[in-house]
């Protein structure tokens, strides 16, 4: 007999899969439109003045669904992957830590550089440039999954650094159960993505309560106790408007982010 909790998780995963499929289809359509626009511009240049092209690329594919079945997803712009991934500069054998000074308390994150070198290297490169400074943690989910999502400079789930990084460490949390999910334990820090392989950018999520998800999100760090406590307090305050998925009532601004050798 399927319990109500199992049914809720099943519905969340099914909703997640539909959401990611819509977003990926939207990205493909936008890319096709970009090609059409580029081709049309070339034609206009040949024909001369008096010709124009009008295309509406808003298909709604990147609109967020504010419900309990939301996933830690990110919807990079069509230009993602056009910028090269930062050159590898970290010491893969060394220990690294990320510190987030936020408006709701400090969060220290121990990073697994040996198992997630691309992710760690990317975060260090971005943090060194001040990329995360002044950004808001734009999304809190309090049902189905239990995460606070950050790292988007746009603050709407569509921002990214202009490149993507490969998935890493996906087997760290064990083999999936019969429902296709694994447990992301409270304190885990992992990469958000579009639901497709190799689409991580700068967005990440902080797990404040054990969460069942497909093993497709790179787990690259673990929060310290003080950081986990801070995120739990943010979650306790709830989501704006009383929903289960959306902007946290307590505004969370990353005032300063840094990645250094531990």
Image (spheres, rainbow, N blue to C red):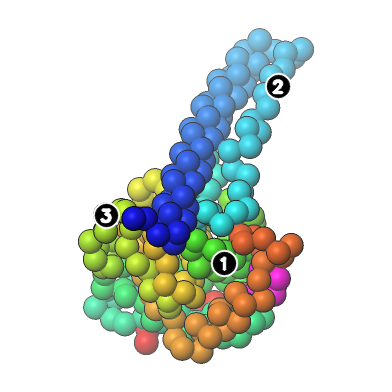
Asked whether disc 3 touches disc 2, contact meaning CB atoms under 8 Å apart, the reply is: no
Total numbered labels placed on residues in the image = 3
Q: Position of residue 47 (x, y in %)?
A: 66, 10
Label 2 crowding class (10 Å Cα cut-off): few <14, some 14-19, many 20+? few
**Mark 3 or mark 1, which has the lower sequence index?**
1
Q: Position of residue 96 (x, y in %)?
A: 36, 80
Q: Nearer the viewer, mark 3 or mark 1?
A: 3
Indicate which disc residue 230 carries.
Answer: none
Distance between the alpha carbons at the discs numbered 2 and 1 = 42 Å
Distance between the alpha carbons at the discs numbered 3 and 2 = 49 Å
Pick the front one: 1 or 137 = 1
Q: Is residue 131 visible?
A: no
Label 1 crowding class (10 Å Cα cut-off): few <14, some 14-19, many 20+? many
Name which residue lies at 62% across and 77% down: 236
Label 3: which residue? 178
Q: Residues in magenta? A: 248-253
Label 1: which residue? 142
Q: Is residue 7 visible?
A: yes
Pick the front one: 18 or 34 = 18
Q: Secondary structure beneath disc 1?
A: loop
Q: Secondary structure beneath disc 3?
A: loop
Q: Main secondary structure of the magenta part?
A: loop
Distance between the alpha carbons at the discs numbered 3 and 1 = 24 Å
């Amino acid at each position: 007999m399927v319990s109500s909790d199992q049914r809720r998780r099943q519905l969340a995963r099914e909703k997640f899969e539909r959401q990611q499929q819509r977003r990926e289809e939207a990205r493909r359509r936008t890319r096709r439109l970009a090609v059409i626009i580029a081709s049309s511009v070339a034609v206009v240049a040949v024909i001369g003045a008096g010709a124009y092209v009008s295309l509406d690329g808003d298909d709604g594919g990147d609109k967020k669904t504010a419900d309990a079945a939301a996933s830690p997803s990110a919807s990079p712009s069509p230009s993602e992957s056009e910028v090269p991934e930062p050159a590898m500069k970290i010491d893969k054998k060394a220990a690294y830590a990320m510190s987030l000074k936020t408006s709701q308390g400090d969060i220290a994150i121990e990073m697994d550089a040996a198992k997630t070198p691309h992710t760690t290297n990317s975060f260090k490169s971005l943090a060194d440039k001040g990329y995360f400074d002044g950004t808001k943690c734009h999304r809190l989910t309090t049902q189905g999954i239990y995460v606070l999502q950050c790292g988007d400079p746009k603050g709407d789930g569509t921002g990214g650094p202009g490149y993507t990084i490969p998935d890493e460490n996906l087997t760290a949390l064990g083999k999936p159960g019969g429902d296709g999910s694994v447990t992301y334990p409270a304190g885990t820090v992992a990469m958000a993505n579009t639901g497709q392989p190799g689409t991580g950018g700068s967005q990440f999520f902080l797990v404040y309560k054990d969460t069942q998800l497909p093993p497709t999100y790179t787990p690259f760090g673990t929060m310290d106790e003080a950081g986990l406590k801070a995120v739990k307090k943010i979650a306790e305050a709830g989501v704006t408007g009383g929903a289960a998925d959306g902007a946290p009532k307590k505004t969370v601004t990353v005032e300063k982010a840094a990645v250094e050798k531990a």
